[in-house]
């Protein structure tokens, strides 16, 4: 498998039937991610919470963000378009759902971290890669790159930057190959680092 052989599909708001596979991909991939292990240190609790967390996040993005997946469902990406703001009623519903899912400790960690990261987004319109995930058994086979590349071509065609937060040194290497540049390393209290990365339109 090379990244050129992975077929990528965008999920529109009418395609909610695609969401279970996307949620499964995000939940299994992020179970190993250091910052998610810091949000939810207990393995059993994390495994129980992640599907509900990503279901709420994906449903909230359907009406205004973009969700992409590989045709076989093994890879998924959640993007926020340039200038898009989560509609107020969607944000309120998401806040209520997450309040019930996260619990106080993880909810506080996420709420405290968000503005530290937000400060490093580009000032102007940009595509924001909120989540990129490949199921553990399919990682390292080109899926992540396959989902990224068409969107980076789109950024170049539209002349807008892209932004993301890298969660490990290995991810950072992948993104640096695609011309993202670290603009800030962020930690909160005893959290593992996140790297805020921007890619200017090429
Ligand atoms: C990060 C991720 C999306 C990359 O997708 P992928 O399909 O595994 O990556 P590709 O095969 O297209 O590219 C391989 C590159 O990805 C990076 N990478 C990150 N995590 C990796 C992993 N677990 N296995 C293999 N490559 C990984 C490396 O830079 C690797 O290049 P290298 O072999 O030269 O070091 C995927 O590994 C994943 O879902 N990881 C867990 C969730 C996560 O960290 N998401 C990103 C948050 S920023």
Image (cartoon, rainbow, N blue to C red):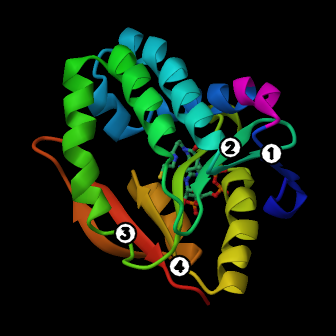
Location of residue 165 by image quarter:
bottom left
- Which residue position holds label 1? 70
Residue pushed farthest bottom? Answer: 202
Query: Marks 2 and 4, how far apart in space?
Result: 21 Å
In front: mark 4 or mark 1? 4
Find residue 44 and report its horizontal and vertical position in percent.
40, 9
- Give the secondary structure at mark 4: loop
Front-lying residue, 172 or 89: 89
Instruction: State yes or no: discs 2 and 1 in contact (Cβ < 8 Å).
Output: yes
- Among the two numbered marks 2 and 1 on one chain, the one whose residue lies closer to the N terminus: 1
Instruction: State yes or no: discs 4 and 1 in contact (Cβ < 8 Å).
Output: no
- Which residue position holds label 2? 76
Density class for disc 2 (Cα within 10 Å; few <14, some 14-19, many ≥20) is: many
- Which residue position holds label 3? 121
In front: mark 2 or mark 4? 4
- Give the secondary structure at mark 3: loop
Density class for disc 4 (Cα within 10 Å; few <14, some 14-19, many ≥20) is: many
- Which residue position holds label 4? 161
Query: Marks 2 and 3, how far apart in space?
Result: 22 Å
Magenta segment: 14-20
Q: Which residue is depicted at the point 46% across and 62% down?
A: 164
């Amino acid at each position: 498998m090379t990244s050129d052989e992975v077929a990528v599909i965008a999920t529109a708001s009418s395609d909610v039937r695609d969401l279970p596979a996307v949620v499964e991909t995000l939940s299994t991939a992020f179970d190993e991610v250091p910052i998610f292990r810091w949000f939810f240190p207990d393995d059993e609790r994390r495994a129980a919470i992640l599907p509900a967390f990503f279901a709420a996040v994906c449903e909230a993005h359907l009406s205004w963000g973009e969700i992409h997946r590989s045709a076989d469902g093994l890879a998924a990406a959640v993007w926020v378009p340039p200038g898009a703001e989560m509609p107020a009623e969607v944000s309120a519903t998401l806040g209520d759902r997450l309040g019930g899912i996260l619990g106080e400790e993880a909810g506080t960690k996420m709420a405290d971290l968000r503005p530290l990261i937000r400060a490093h987004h580009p000032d102007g319109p940009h595509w924001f890669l909120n989540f990129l995930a490949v199921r553990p058994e399919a990682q390292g086979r080109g899926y992540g790159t396959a989902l990224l590349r068409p969107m980076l071509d789109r950024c170049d065609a539209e002349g807008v930057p892209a932004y993301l937060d890298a969660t490990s040194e290995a991810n950072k290497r992948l993104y640096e190959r695609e011309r993202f540049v670290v603009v800030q390393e962020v930690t909160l209290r005893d959290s593992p680092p996140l790297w805020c990365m921007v890619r200017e339109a090429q």
